[in-house]
Each structure stands twice: as C-alpha cells, then as structure tokens.
C-alpha cells in the first residue's frame, strides 16, 4: 500500500519535569512547544498527571491559547481528568493507564477489562469534539476492545521494543517488533487509525515510520534528552528527517 505522510507529535512533559525540579518558571514547556512547532512537529502532546509531577493545569491553559498545531492531551480515565478535557476540548485526547508510583507509563490501557467505563469516556470526549485515542499494547483482545468502545484511534506502546534494542536483545526485539507490526495491521484492517510511541529514539524510530498502517508517532523523553546536547530544534528536525526518509 502507498503510505500517507507520517505525523510527528512531540511530548513536552519533561521540559516541565526540569522546571519543577527547582520550582522555577523555567524552562517553560510552552516555549518548548512553540520551538517544536517551528522545527516540524505536527502536534504537541502533554500528559496532565494526577500528581502534577510535570505538566500543570496552567500549562494546558497556555498551550491551548498559544499553539497553531493540535494539542494531544494525555490523561488517565478519571472523573477529574474528564472534567478538565471537557472544559478545554483539545483536538485530541489519549487515554493512558496511570499509577502514581510509576516513573513513566507502564504498559497499555486494559480496554478489554474495563470496556463499559471506557465506552462512556470515549462517548463524552467524542461528543465534545476531541479525537480519542487509546494507549494500548499489541494484544489483539485490546485492539478488538478498542473497536467495541468506538475509539477512532489507538496508540501502540513501543516501550518494550525500545528497551530490548537498548539491552542488545536482538532476537526478542525482532519478535516484539513483529507483534507490533501485526497489531498495526489488525487495527488498520478494523478501521482504526494507528499511532505509536514510547521510548522511540533515533535508533528505533525507522521501522515504525516505515510502516504504512502507522499514521503518527509521539516522541518526548528522547528528544528532550537529546536537546541537552544538540538543541531542541535540531533534535526534532533530525527525528523528522529520519521519519520522512524511512517513510519514503
């Protein structure tokens, strides 16, 4: 199949993590979002966590006002977050699992085990005009559940693959990549738009960017980390270059 252009969403959470480490006003995640926008990002992702460990409510207010590209609002499926999303009505909302003690999002959302409640969240957010995505693993049960709850988009969790590559576990990484590709094909054939993200880097992005069924990649921690050495704009531009080259 001919692959449509692939979009890059840049997650600016960890600019806010650095800001919050000192309780200061800088570095400003909104400034980072605007730099990302200028460097070729097609959208900005921000995860408002229950404990506000990085992005805070005021950041969402300012991002909604400042951005010319879409905001993807990541959130847990809680009543507090639903109320915030319904008030702001961002372009996109990605429902993710969230545990207070985790360092970062671990695993995918259990849609199959919580489909009644997730159905209600999807319906309310869709009615408000937000495109809803579900952050899930490649398990066919979760993909089938995403169809049942009428979510138009899934985002496949690429973290395990990236960890295996970093650990030099080539055989296990190849198996995980094959499972992710199979999940992307299954979701696409079921009428879902497919995104992917978590842990992606210059070294791991190309297979996903080259996959015709995947329409968007969301990348954050690596880009913010690489910005320490090469600057945020150049890091995003290089990721954009690698994605576009793989797509061709």
Image (spheres, helix red, strand yellow):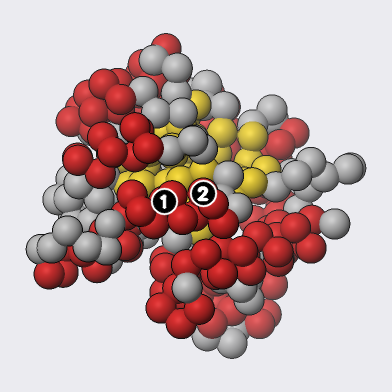
Do the numbered discs 2 and 1 sit on residues whose CB atoms are within 8 Å?
Answer: yes
In the rendered view, would you say 202 is above or below 54? Answer: below
SS class, disc 1: helix
Image coordinates of residue 222 in percent, x first then y, are 47, 70
Residue at 69% across / 30% down in the picture?
A: 190
171 or 51, which is in the foreground? Answer: 51
Can you identify the residue that label 1 sits on?
33
Task: Residue at the far left: name it.
Answer: 23
Residue shown at 55%/77% (left/top)?
164
Q: Is residue 136 visible?
A: no
Q: Label 1: few (<14), some or many (≥20) within 10 Å?
A: many
Asked whether, in this view, residue 41 is left or right of residue 100, the answer is: right
Instruction: Depth check: give the residue in front, 65 or 146.
Output: 65
The quadrant of the picture occupied by the N terminus is top right
Q: Is residue 62 left or right of residue 209?
A: left
Q: Residue furthest bottom?
A: 168
Q: CA distance from mark 2 to mark 1?
A: 6 Å
Which residue corresponds to mark 2? Answer: 37
* Horizontal and vertical percent position of residue 211: 76, 53
Q: Residue furthest top?
A: 127
* 191 relative to 64 in the view: left or right: right
Q: Residue at x 59, y 84 (%)?
A: 169
Picture quarter containing residue 103?
Answer: bottom left
Using the image as rendered, state which of residue 86 and residue 171 is in the foreground: 86
- Label 2 sits on a secondary structure element that is helix
């Amino acid at each position: 199949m001919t692959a449509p252009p692939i979009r890059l969403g840049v997650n600016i959470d960890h600019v806010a993590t650095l800001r919050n480490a000192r309780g200061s006003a800088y570095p400003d995640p909104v400034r980072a979002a605007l730099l990302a926008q200028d460097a070729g990002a097609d959208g900005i992702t921000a995860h408002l966590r229950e404990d506000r460990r990085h992005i805070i409510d005021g950041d969402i207010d300012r991002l909604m006002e400042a951005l010319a590209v879409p905001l993807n609002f990541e959130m847990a499926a809680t009543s507090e977050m639903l109320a915030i999303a319904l008030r702001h009505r961002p372009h996109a909302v990605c429902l993710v699992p969230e545990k207070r003690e985790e360092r970062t999002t671990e695993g995918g959302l259990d849609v199959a085990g919580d489909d009644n409640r997730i159905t209600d969240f999807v319906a309310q957010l869709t009615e408000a005009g937000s495109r809803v995505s579900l952050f899930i693993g490649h398990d066919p049960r979760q993909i089938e559940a995403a169809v049942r709850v009428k979510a138009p988009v899934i985002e496949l969790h690429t973290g395990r693959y990236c960890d295996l590559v970093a650990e030099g576990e080539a055989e296990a990484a190849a198996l995980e990549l094959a499972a992710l590709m199979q999940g992307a094909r299954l979701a696409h054939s079921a009428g879902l738009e497919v995104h992917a993200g978590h842990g992606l880097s210059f070294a791991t992005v190309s297979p996903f960017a080259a996959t015709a069924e995947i329409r968007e990649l969301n990348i954050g921690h690596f880009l913010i980390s690489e910005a320490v050495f090469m600057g945020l704009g150049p890091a995003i531009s290089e990721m954009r270059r690698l994605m576009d080259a793989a797509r061709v």
